[in-house]
């Protein structure tokens, strides 16, 4: 069933709910919750809109009951729910950004950027967007609109960021729930899981221990004992011959 005119700007969240209904009930539930909360503000004086919202509320209660029966913590725990949705939004955003920077501008990339922007918007259910998430949401909105325009006009897109004045103005003008520049919403096929980056640990620095200094002990002085003095015994005195006896005459 199509949303009435008063709720038309929120229709992308019903489509997103349908796309995630079977593979990620948490995301689907919060798409309906966002639709109801924003829709109440939009159709306060529109009977058709109110009736439509009542039908969505019934589905929302059923989805909540199913999640509670599964003991899913994302219902009733905003921290868990917010973390889950942010993780999904970042997964899609990073996949689309990597493909875009590689020069792949096909419809899948456009739709992935667009879906990521809607998921970032869902985070406002819990709190104001962080500065980083707000930038990623705006960038994804702008990139989806820019690539779709290039696809239709035959213009060659520029890969990566290129937020010039005109594009920045378009991004700001499209910063409304569900406004993306798309007239039709073809079925979004979930992209394959982005490859996990391989982790190459930094090479361990080789440790070359300092060379041990060679120890050359000082040369032992050679000991030359003093020469032993030569002992020359004194010459034996010449034998004294007794004087001859004097002859007495």
Image (cartoon, rainbow, N blue to C red):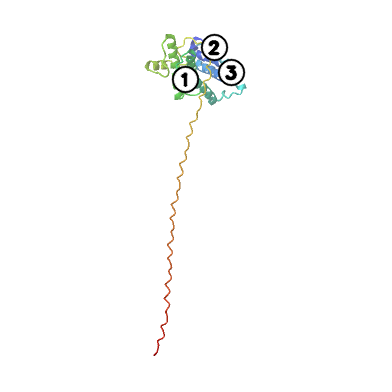
The quarter of the picture where residue 1 lies is top right
Outermost residue on the bottom side: it is 249
Q: Of residues 216 and 213, which is closer to you in this image?
A: 216
Q: Of residues 124 and 239, which is closer to you in this image?
A: 239
Crowd around label 3: few <14 · some 14–19 · many ≥20 (10 Å): many
Crowd around label 2: few <14 · some 14–19 · many ≥20 (10 Å): some
**Residue pictured at 44% horizontal, 9% vertical:** 152
**Residue pictured at 52% horizontal, 18% vertical:** 34
Whether tag 3 and tag 1 are in contact, CB under 8 A, the answer is no
- Residue occupied by mark 1: 98
Q: Is residue 52 visible?
A: yes
Query: Taking 212 as reference, is 55 above or below it?
Result: above
Which segment is the magenta one?
95-99
Q: Nearer the viewer, mark 3 or mark 1?
A: 1
Q: Measure how far apart labels 3 and 1 are at the Cα level.
A: 34 Å
Crowd around label 1: few <14 · some 14–19 · many ≥20 (10 Å): some
- Residue occupied by mark 3: 63
The quarter of the picture where residue 151 lies is top left
């Amino acid at each position: 069933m199509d949303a009435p005119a008063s709720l038309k700007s929120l229709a992308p969240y019903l489509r997103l709910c349908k796309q995630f209904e079977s593979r990620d009930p948490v995301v689907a539930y919060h798409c309906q919750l966002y639709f109801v909360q924003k829709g109440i503000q939009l159709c306060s004086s529109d009977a058709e809109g109110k009736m439509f919202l009542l039908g969505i509320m019934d589905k929302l209660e059923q989805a909540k009951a199913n999640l509670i029966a599964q003991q899913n913590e994302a219902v009733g725990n905003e921290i868990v729910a917010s973390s889950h949705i942010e993780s999904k939004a970042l997964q899609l955003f990073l996949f689309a950004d990597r493909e875009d920077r590689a020069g792949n501008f096909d419809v899948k990339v456009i739709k992935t950027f667009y879906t990521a922007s809607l998921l970032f918007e869902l985070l406002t259910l819990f709190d104001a967007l962080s500065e980083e998430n707000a930038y990623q949401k705006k960038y994804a909105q702008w990139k989806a609109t820019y690539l779709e325009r290039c696809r239709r006009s035959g213009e060659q897109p520029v890969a990566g960021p290129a937020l010039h004045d005109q594009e920045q103005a378009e991004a700001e003008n499209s910063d409304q729930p569900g406004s993306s520049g798309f007239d039709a919403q073809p079925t979004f096929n979930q992209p394959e899981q982005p490859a996990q980056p391989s982790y190459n640990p930094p090479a361990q620095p080789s440790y070359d221990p300092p060379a041990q200094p060679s120890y050359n002990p000082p040369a032992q002085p050679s000991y030359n004992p003093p020469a032993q003095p030569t002992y020359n015994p004194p010459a034996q005195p010449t034998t004294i011959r007794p004087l001859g006896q004097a002859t007495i005459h």
